[in-house]
Amino acid sequence: MENTNNSREATLPDPSSPPPRSTSSSGLPSSKSKCAICLDEIRKEDGKAIFTAECSHSFHFDCITSNVKHGNRICPLCRTEWKQVPLFVDNRVPAPTFPVQTGFEDDEPLVAQSGQPSGVAAAHRQALEIKLLPQVSAVEKSVARGDFAVLVHLKAAEGVSDDNDRPETRAPLDLIAVLDVSGSMEGTKLHLLKNAVAFVIDNLGERDRLSVIAFSSGARRLFPLRLMSERGKRQAIQAVNTLVAGGGTNIAEGLKIGARVIADRRWKNPVSGMMLLSDGQDNFTLSRSYSHSHSQVRLRADYESLLPSSRIPIHTFGFGVDHDAELMHTISQVSSGTFSFIETETVIRDAFAQCIGGLLSVVVLDQVVEIECLHEEGLKISSIKAGSYRSRVSSDGRTAKIDVGDMYAEEERDFLVILEIPRCEDESMPLVKIRCVYKDAVSREIVRVESEELSIQRPREMTGEEVVSVEVDRQLNRFLVSEAMSEARVLADGGDLEGAVGVLRNRERELAETQSARARDGLCLSLSSELGALQERMSSRRMYERSGRAYAFSSMSSHSAQRATARWPVCGSAAPQAYQTSSMARMVSRSQELGIKTPKPSPARRDRS
């Protein structure tokens, strides 16, 4: 029997906690005392206009007009569809109407793969390097330790080419773009979104395929899964340029259509991915919610059931200050994707560029790491620190596995194996060896790579001071900082901003005293900078709600997956982006060289010079 770490279950309310005040029997906020939209009390003495709907639920007039003007005419409490709404709501921008679509088995066939170029398959069989490092190189014979860390370091090789002129040298991609076109996206946001998607289309190759889904109050497939030939690119850009904003925000419906496109396709490229962007809260899908300690807690199981059964990574993008950062982070985490926070509208193209820079450079697929203990008596694996990656330790503690999945060219993965080391009379002790099994993304071959055995010395007495490996210390810091961010976010969501800042400040102080930080390690400098930035975003409730929560979730996503995400400071800042690969950096530079341009309104043609 195996123990499973890193459970992905949705966070449920603590049954021991007192119920929220003024709630109905369903657990929802009572409409008699609070507005279900802003969660403030409804009191006549405040002088605010009150709107009472035909279902008898009441709201602040300003809140409900803001909600209804984007096409949402469903009561947030009882889900009744209203026939009457405030008379002077601006209805000039109608909600888009989406026809019912029953099947998506019309994806364009893949380009027939020609024979492998000389040397490509051989090069990719060595796409992964493994290195093992102990926390210290020696432990006295008479000492037993229960928390000895071994670092498993994986590094993917450089990609052969990311040039679309040589498409056979990289793995082709099936990309599904799921885009929010609700009323709040009207104007500059929608123009910048069209510009960013056009950039993605321009940088896909002729063997890549793209499908576009648009959602507001409903969802539809705007563009089928088609090859990005010159003709396919023109058609895709024309389709994107027809987008208009209007209606509410139905993220679940967009996810559902995206999952259907993935499930119904007749052919599959080696690499698949989904990009989901939204700037608002899902105001159509009821995922039981209630008010508690200044925050809104939601059960996410209904969204998780909508994800593609094939578990392709969904990279989510929270646009602006009003999106649902918790939901977007949950979707990305469950699907092994990433969550990026786009605080400044003008960098949306850079964020998309970084994402596709990775997706277009995948060299390793379906990777599993197998760990085996070597010393026969008393040596056991007590736990695995693997971040968001699923890990399993066998019941006897002698073996373990980590599901790593895909890796981009030049990406690195670091996992800490925590061992129980017994006393030993031998001069040296073999600890572990590692085996990696993965699929080469280009040659499609199954590859097995084994590490050398890792041993430590067992002297009678230690001479001099124990020296901890800088590499191991760096990764311990990453895990501790990520845990501190998670703890601080929970405290902030509970209303204790002072406690949250205290947790971050203490971790920042402890980080500065570590060996790797004193050595001016790049990752530790980045961690320290993020701890400081998050403290600033928790300086007030307003600041935390507008950017702090999203910043925390994006940082946690990046460090738990060891993959670059966009957040503030964003791509293009002076500080290097943690985990950013060369392919990502090149794509971001390509985006920034274009400058900020507003797309021309005509959907018929686009200057591709």
Image: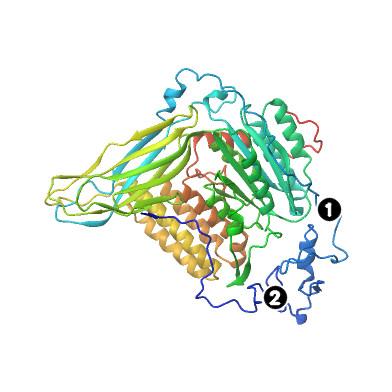
Query: Whole-percent x and y of residue 62?
Result: 78, 68
Query: Whole-percent x and y of residue 523?
Result: 42, 47
Local packing at callout 2 (Cα closer than 10 Å; few below 14, some 14-19, many 20+) is many
Can the viewer see residue 427?
yes
In the rendered structure, which amino acid carries the disc numbered 1? Pro
Would residue 104 be found to the left or right of residue 552 on screen? right
Would residue 571 be found to the left or right of residue 451 on screen? right
Q: Residue furthest right?
A: 87
Image marks 2 and 1: residues in contact by CB distance under 8 Å:
no
Residue closer to the observer: 330 or 45: 330
In the rendered structure, which amino acid carries the disc numbered 2? Lys
Q: Residue furthest top?
A: 118
State the mark number for residue 563: none
Q: Which residue is mark 1?
A: 94
Query: Whole-percent x and y of residue 375?
Result: 21, 46
Q: Residue furthest bottom?
A: 45
Task: Describe the element under mark 1 as helix, strand or loop.
Answer: loop
Residue closer to the observer: 131 or 591: 131
Residue closer to the observer: 183 or 254: 254
Q: CA distance from mark 2 to mark 1?
A: 29 Å
Task: Describe the element under mark 2 as helix, strand or loop.
Answer: loop
Residue 229 sits above or below residue 132 on the image: above
Residue 66 sits above or below residue 127 on the image: below
First in sequence: mark 2 or mark 1?
2
Residue 496 sits above or below residue 222 on the image: below
